[in-house]
Amino acid sequence: MAFAKMQLRGRTLFLPAVLLILASSMATTTRAAAAGGCADDKLPANRTYAHCAALAQLGATLHWSYDAKIALLSLAFVARTPSANGTAGWVAWALNPTGAGMKGAQALVAFKRGNPPAYVVNTYNLTGHRALGGDSTPIAYRATDLAADESGGKVRLYGTLQLHQGMEVVNHIWNVGSTVTDGAPVKHALAEENMDARGRLVLSGSVLGLAPEPAPAPAPRGSSAKDSSGGAAPTYVSTPVLMLLAFAGFLAIA
């Protein structure tokens, strides 16, 4: 009888230990998956960020820090353009406070212009599928520290956005284009990866990275516009959350 009790007690102590080890291992794996596509981005020494993620489309990565107390978002967006050398053309990243697609997005767009060509970063309020001009248009957020450079055949776009208080999860989109004409970006390709380059970004909290998109509503019959959401993007869960789930599982078993 005593031996049976000792065996039961041993199992009781063993289960939570195993669950916590598994939780820690899962957390390490998810962090590695989150950083795996962006850890190779060698940003300048003065550009450091708390988080990074490989985005679901176009081989792009995003690095960011968010100060929730003052609603300040600092970011670096890294992508290769479709041009032959990977840096001609343009790259863009945007927040959309009103929807999940392009219309209503508040965009930062980096491209070269001038003679000799030099990078500029323009802001654009995207009101629809219209051609962009060569000059910035006002956006909903104060944008500072706008800059761009290139490294390893990729364009790196930097910026800081003053968001609104209370923002924690945002819709974001990104894209790349091969052509700049008369000092203005020309529209991107309509390939699936271009149309699906969007998601939801958790700025801070226990979940870091991209959250899954809701299922899209059926398109009206006869509509020629394509605005699909694509597949669900990965969600990265922190170690404390996984450990809490493991402990809850132990309590259920006990």
Image (tube, rainbow, N blue to C red):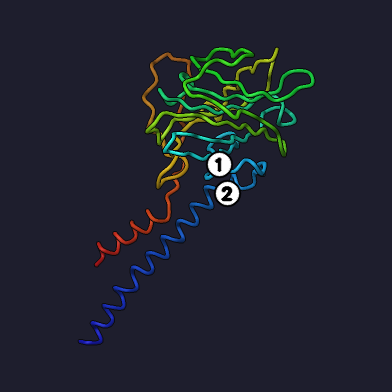
207 shown above or below 18:
above
Given contact means CB atoms under 8 Å apart, are the residues at marks 1 and 2 in contact? yes
Residue at left offset 45%, top offset 29%: 163
Q: Is residue 49 above or below residue 157?
A: below
Residue 106 in the image, given as x and y percentages of width and height: 50, 22
Q: Which residue is mark 1?
A: 54
Q: Position of residue 239 (x, y in %)?
A: 42, 56
Among the 4 quarters of the image, the one containing residue 77:
top right
Badge 1: residue crowd in 10 Å (few <14, some 14–19, many ≥20): many
Under mark 1, the amino acid is Ala
Residue placed under numbered mark 2 in the picture:
36
At 25% from the left edge and 87% from the top edge, which residue is drawn? 3
Position of residue 74 in the picture relative to residue 216 (left or right) = right
Where residue 8 sits, quadrant-wise, is bottom left
Residue farthest along the bottom direction in this orientation: 2
- Name which residue lies at 53% across and 42% down: 53
Mark 1 and mark 2: Cα distance apart in space: 7 Å
In the image, residue 236 sits, relative to residue 168, either above or below, namely below
- Give the crowd class for mark 2: few <14, some 14-19, many >=20 residues within 10 Å: few
Disc 2 element: helix
* SS at mark 1 in the image: strand
